[in-house]
Amino acid sequence: MSFKPDKIFYYLFRFPVFKMRLGSIKMGSRLMKTKIDGYRNIYIGSKVYVNDYGWLACLPLTGNYNCRMSIGDGTYVGRFCHFYATSKIEIGKKVLIADRVYITDNLHEFKNIKVPVIDQGVKQVNEVTIGNGAWIGENVSIIGASVGKQSVIGANSVVTKDIPDYCVAVGAPAKIIKRFSVEKDEWLKTDEKGDFLK
């Protein structure tokens, strides 16, 4: 197996630093020009690739000092992605995440109209799980919602409610437009409720 100079530099110098500082990182994983906050709360599986200019943050801003972010084996994360956990974000194995994806389990508070949003702090919403084999399209935002295994989220969608396994969802807010039928062994269109069209 041959190594390019940038890979040699990475595994000799950068990887050992990640190994010391992160909760864990397994062999074959590469975090490129990635900003990281809350190192000890972040767990990276094997053969994970996080492309340039990403930001991984896992901090107890809502009081959960056991907050955790994990990215499963073989997952690819595109450029300029921003993942911010204050409780839990769990990304499964072999997930394909395009560029400019935002995933979070929290929101800025905005309840008090007499106080600027920037001064109102952060509130916890639901924990986020992305199932194994899912595909998250470009410019998607996932906010306090989960995506099932082998599901697809179309580009520019905003996911605020859970998407089950084997679904295609698009839009803002994201709605299911297709589901996989085990009975017919194919992807079929659905109505607004996610039921198969007749």
Image (cartoon, grey):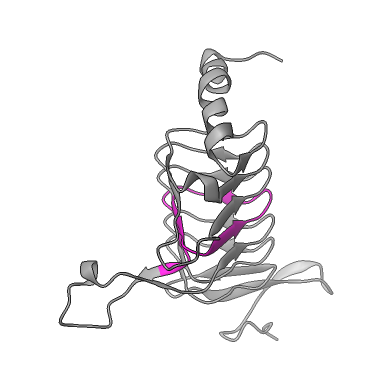
Q: Residue at the location (60% across, 58% down)?
A: 90
Is 95 rendered above or below residue 171? above
Q: Residue at the location (38% across, 70% down)?
A: 107
Q: Is residue 110 magenta?
A: no
Is 7 rendered above or below residue 141? above
Picture coordinates of residue 195, whole percent (x, y): 67, 84
Picture coordinates of residue 113, whole percent (x, y): 19, 83
- The quarter of the image holding the C terminus is bottom right
Report the magenta residues as a range: 82-106
Relative horizontal placement of residue 34, taking residue 121 as reference (left or right) = right
Q: Indicate the quadrant where residue 20 lies.
A: top right
Q: Nearer the viewer, residue 144 or 64?
A: 64
Farthest residue, direction right: 183
Is 152 rendered above or below residue 41? below
Relative horizontal placement of residue 142, taking residue 20 as reference (left or right) = left
Picture coordinates of residue 123, whole percent (x, y): 39, 73
Farthest residue, direction left: 114
Q: Residue at the location (59% across, 49% down)?
A: 96
- The quarter of the image holding the N terminus is top right
Q: Indicate the quadrant where residue 173 lies.
A: bottom left
